[in-house]
């Protein structure tokens, strides 16, 4: 494992996975253009040594490929994370997470799970307080043209529960709005938000520290959906993964522990009685801009850093981005505990095009009727899995990845009327599709082999033929699946088009009709599913259409109008060609084009 970010970068350089860029580059949009190309092509991490008008270099792409993410977490393959947890669970005196907690004292000397307090720290080599704090010195990126400003995108935000003292480390974007002020994007379902609400109820300021850098395991741990267990924090998870304790030092101006080997630490507080301020827009992991909203103000009372600090960053946007591999790491790590709760579960996968919450495939050992639904219900009750929009259930022998391949296998066993369910429940707060913020529809597709009580085996579907419609711009077809794109110009256009297309004999064999905007090529299943699920609220946009040849599940992933019960629809986050023109010489010189 790696003591700090510098050690990790040296290891990446030795592997040929770090590219140093000497030329001046702007943190406003230009780094995004270069990094996005690197992420989309599986390229190296990028170290920008000369960021215009900033005092520190910037590194991006620390988790830019699945292999690099595995390397950062100390394994050869991300699947090994599940194997490590399985071995730990096998030692537990009782099943589940409580059994793992009972093991902790026994493994203290062996695994280094418990953080270690130190008196001196490299991250406090330089200490600036009060008016000396100036966040404009940091190369904080403005990632996308319509972003509300520069955003810190890879923070480890440290808070304590004001009542219990339990520590939490989470990753929440932070818009810089002054030399010593940021906004704190504490979403509805996040632990940091709960700590803030408790502080507000008590009428107290909430101390906050924000670490940047350190062992990359610390950055990952801040993103992990760790269950809330007494005495357990993300630093215990990091210690387990790295095999030795995380070294923590007391912050200079707040009573919080911070990673001793970080590059930077921002210390300060959020005052719950202070009015919220407008944050955003922000080009988010959904691929769309999250609109403006009001969030708490974080006042920075101290900035500490190494003498030769490097600022770590990332970008999110239209997938795939590197957050996909952090999500896959969590998926592998928490699979064994999920199996203790859902015994029939064999595997699950969150396809990157589903941006974590929009899509989960799961495979099960099926023994009785309705077990596919039972497994889906159980997973929907687990932590952040409760925010899932579409769950696709397949048999144990079906690989859950790639995502679209599993989807097609599910369709083979699908009667659209008998084997689909539409529910309501919590959704990701960043999801723009539902009528209400963070609340809308969920779709379950039971693509398991059917038992007699479920109607018996479903015959394999043919591939639909080419259909004709003046409003259909492009189409693609697979066994049982037809995809069409259209230029959405009026409310309910997609519903009318679906009815007319499915009345054609050429559409025979269609079990699932996918409709999206014409900005994607339907032959590209990855882009098709990303846009479809991003724009889908199953309560409004999924229905069974009775075609002459049988029922068809229609999924309308087009842009919605207010007349269709939609909130203001956001734009896709993308760069203008002029930005690529500015950096084209660098794209060519460093072979990123």
Image (cartoon, rainbow, N blue to C red):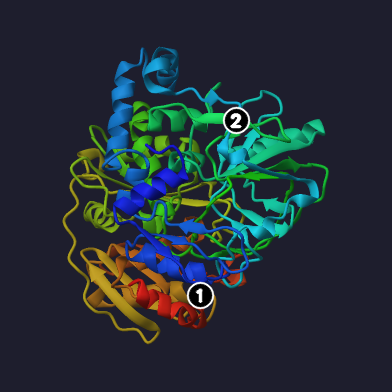
Please name the residue shown 48% across and 27% down the image. 236
Q: Can residue 478 be seen in this view?
A: yes
Q: Quadrant of the N terminus?
A: top left
* Mark 2 neighbour density, 10 Å: few (under 14) some (14–19) many (20 or more): few
Residue 583 image offset from top left, x and y in percent: 46, 77
Please name the residue shown 55% across and 50% down the image. 308
Secondary structure beneath label 1: loop
Q: Which mark is residue 172?
A: none
Q: Quadrant of the C terminus?
A: bottom left
Look at the picture and state if 536 lies above or below 66. below
The quarter holding residue 94 reads top left
Left or right for 546, reference 505: right
What residue would you read off at disc 2?
120
Question: Which mark lies nearer to you, 2 or 1?
Answer: 2
Cα distance between the residues tagged 2 and 1: 43 Å
Residue situated in front as seen by the camera: 392 or 253? 253
* Mark 1 neighbour density, 10 Å: few (under 14) some (14–19) many (20 or more): some
Please name the residue shown 34% across and 67% down the image. 513
Residue situated in front as seen by the camera: 556 or 31? 31
What residue would you read off at disc 1?
575
Residue 478 image offset from top left, x and y in percent: 22, 67
Q: Can residue 344 be seen in this view?
A: no
The quarter holding residue 496 reads bottom left
Left or right for 557, reference 524: right
Residue found at the very far bottom of the displayed protein: 470
Residue 276 image offset from top left, x and y in percent: 77, 52
Residue 591 image offset from top left, x and y in percent: 33, 72
Secondary structure beneath label 2: loop
């Amino acid at each position: 494992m790696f003591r700090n970010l510098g050690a990790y970068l040296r290891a990446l350089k030795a592997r040929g996975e770090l590219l140093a860029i000497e030329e001046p580059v702007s943190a406003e949009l230009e780094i995004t253009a270069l990094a996005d190309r690197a992420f989309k092509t599986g390229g190296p991490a990028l170290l920008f040594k000369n960021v215009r008008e900033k005092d520190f270099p910037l590194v991006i792409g620390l988790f830019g490929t699945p292999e690099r993410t595995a390397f950062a977490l100390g394994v050869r393959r991300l699947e090994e994370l599940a194997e490590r947890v399985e071995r730990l669970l096998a030692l537990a005196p009782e099943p589940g997470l409580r059994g793992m907690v009972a093991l902790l004292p026994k493994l203290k000397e062996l695994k280094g799970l418990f953080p270690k307090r130190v008196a001196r720290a490299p991250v406090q080599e330089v200490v600036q307080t009060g008016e000396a704090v100036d966040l404009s010195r940091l190369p904080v990126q403005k990632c996308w043209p319509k972003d509300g400003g520069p955003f810190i995108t890879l923070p480890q935000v440290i808070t304590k529960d004001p009542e219990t003292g339990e520590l939490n480390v989470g990753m929440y974007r932070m818009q810089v709005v002054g030399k010593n002020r940021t906004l704190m994007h504490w979403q509805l379902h996040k632990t940091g938000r709960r700590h803030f609400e408790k502080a507000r109820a008590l009428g107290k300021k909430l101390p906050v520290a924000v670490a940047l850098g350190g062992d990359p395991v610390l950055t990952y741990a801040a993103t992990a959906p760790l269950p809330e267990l007494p005495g357990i924090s993300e630093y215990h998870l990091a210690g387990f993964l790295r095999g030795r304790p995380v070294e923590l030092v007391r912050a200079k101006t707040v009573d919080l522990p911070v990673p001793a080997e970080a590059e930077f630490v921002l210390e300060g507080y959020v005052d719950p009685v202070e009015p919220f301020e407008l944050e955003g827009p922000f080009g988010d992991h959904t691929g769309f801009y999250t609109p403006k909203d009001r969030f708490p103000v974080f006042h920075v009372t101290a900035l500490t850093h190494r003498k030769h600090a490097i600022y770590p960053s990332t970008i999110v946007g239209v997938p795939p981005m590197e957050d996909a591999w952090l999500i896959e790491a969590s998926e592998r790590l928490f699979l064994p505990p999920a199996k203790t709760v859902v015994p029939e579960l064999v595997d699950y996968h969150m396809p990157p095009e589903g941006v974590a919450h929009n899509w989960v495939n799961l495979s099960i050992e099926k023994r009785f009727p309705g077990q596919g639904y039972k497994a889906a219900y159980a997973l929907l009750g687990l932590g952040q899995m409760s925010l899932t929009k579409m769950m696709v259930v397949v048999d144990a022998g079906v690989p859950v990845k790639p995502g679209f391949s599993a989807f097609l296998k599910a369709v083979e066993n699908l009667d659209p009327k008998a084997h689909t369910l539409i529910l309501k429940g919590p959704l990701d707060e960043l999801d723009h599709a539902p009528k209400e913020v963070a609340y809308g529809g969920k779709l379950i597709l039971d693509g398991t082999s059917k038992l007699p009580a479920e109607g018996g085996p479903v015959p394999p579907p043919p591939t639909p033929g080419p259909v004709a419609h003046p409003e259909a711009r492009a189409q693609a077809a697979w066994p049982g699946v037809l995809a069409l794109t259209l230029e959405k110009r009026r409310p309910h256009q997609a519903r009318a088009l679906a009815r007319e297309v499915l009345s054609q004999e050429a559409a025979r064999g269609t079990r699932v009709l996918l409709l999206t905007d014409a900005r994607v090529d339907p032959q590209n299943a990855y882009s098709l599913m990303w846009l479809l699920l991003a724009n889908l609220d199953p309560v409004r946009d999924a229905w069974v259409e009775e075609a002459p040849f049988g029922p068809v599940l229609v999924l309308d992933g087009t842009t919605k109008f207010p007349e269709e019960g939609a909130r203001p629809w956001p734009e896709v986050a993308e760069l203008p060609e002029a930005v690529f023109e500015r950096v084209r010489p660098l794209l060519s010189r460093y072979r990123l084009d």
